Amino acid sequence: MTSWPQISKVGKFNTRRELYRAIKSHESRIDSNPSDGALRVAYASLLYIAGDFDDSEREAREALKFKEVESDASSIIAKILYLKGQYSKAIDFLERVISANPSDQQLYWELAQCHLRMNNYAKAARIFEEHKFSNPLVPLVQKVAEKPAFQILGEKNTTVVPILQVDPLPVIEIGVNGKEVFAFIDTGGPGFSTNIEFARKEGYQILSSQTGDYALKKNAPVEYLQVDSISIGEFVLQNVPGCALEGIRPQFGKYTCEDCVGTGILNQFLSTIDYPNQRLILTKRNIPEARKEHFRLLGEMCGKVPIFMVSDHYLIAQGSLNEREELTFFVDSGLAALGQPDPNGPVVQAAFMMPYNAMIEFGIIEPSKEMTFPFFYKIESLGLGSLIQHDLYGFLHSREGERFNFDGIMIDGLVSHAFLKNYAWTLDFDDYQFIFTK
């Protein structure tokens, strides 16, 4: 199976320096050969890797003029439209690619993912059945497809849910199948998740399982399940897919959290995690007056940045680190790390996590530096869009591990709770943007 977009022709890059050198080379070659469609596709792929999605889409649309690369160009456009949450448009371009490559099963998988993001589980289930996919996700999709997924019940347009405590992660109370439980909010989670022990105790039907990597665990069990209802404030979500993970049962203060509320739940609403005022504000989407009322509950806007979503929950955005701008960050409201950089000092929370090779490239540490792990370091400045914070802590788990890579996109680091908790942070999945207010 091939994956889209078609980036295999442009090579693998370990540093932004290497990537930008390739981009400059392709810019020069296109100036000399503007009618070379393959060159434009390669250039669009490089821009995609760099996280420059608008320019990548523009170049890919230019490449559509050349018949011999129309399918590759359509692949890139489809993927970028997916990242921007424009799933219907992504499907249109993806179907062009399928017509040129009808035997490529991966394309049908991606088509089904578009339908899942639109909560059209019945359509996705039909695609899985028609093309005989055996992935562990398939039984979950088939089960949820029996009824409308994520159906929202509640007379009001907005609900305000108290956040019981903010640190080290925000905790709220929710109901799952009628039982009240504590849950933590973490956009690094896909949607609804619980721990395997609790799922078995409550008799949740396990539909399938596989192994996966999460919370620094490698090849750990992941079990897929469906719950009939989740109540959050005055809203009830019916027919919700979820998963159960091993050992994810944190004790935050006096609260034992059996569940996690992640991106797949929050993106059903216009969602604001208002850390300073300890409240979660949820508003039904696509209701203009309700949207206005939602923002009337918030303070003055201090920042706004476009977001892109990889897979079903990985939120990425452009940011800056010290003097470096136009970097691509994974924005994950979970806990990067707690630690004690100074043995005689206080426990601190890291706002940022960056892999070792990126730290070397950006001059944060010298290659010869002796280090003990976990390694905490001070960051001069960290930003999302125009929103900048100073004197935060970064974190490195070990020397091992390459730079993050999501669907071919070079990720420079992870921005987490310690940065986000200073704001009322709105996840706007209608206009695909983060909005920060104070």
Image (cartoon, grey):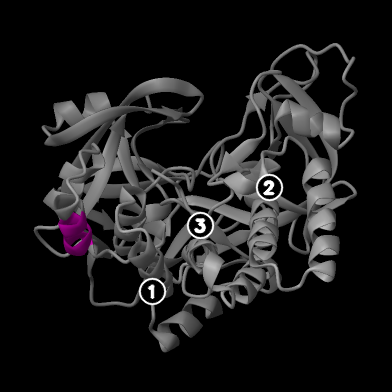
- The span shown in magenta is 121-127
Disc 2 versus disc 3: nearer the observer: 3
Which residue position holds label 2? 419
State which quarter of the image contains the C terminus. bottom right
Which mark is first along the chain, 3 or 2? Answer: 3
At 69% across and 61% down in the image, what residue appears?
A: 39
Q: Residues within 10 Å of mark 3 (few under 14, many from 20)?
A: some
Q: Image check: 329 left or right of 152?
A: right
Is the stretch drawn in magenta largely helix, strand or loop?
A: helix
Q: Which amino acid type is shown beneath numbered disc 3?
A: Met
Residue at the extreme bottom of the image, as rendered: 289
Query: Could you say which quadrant of the image residue 348 lies in?
Result: top right
Query: Could you say which quadrant of the image residue 251 lies in?
Result: top left
| 174 vs 77, nearest the viewer | 77
State which quarter of the image contains the N terminus. top left
The residue tagged with tag 2: helix, strand or loop? helix
Q: Is residue 17 magenta?
A: no
Tell me, yes or no, whether the two marked residues, 2 and 3, touch with CB atoms within 8 Å. Answer: no
Tell me where residue 310 appears, x and y as whole percent.
50, 53
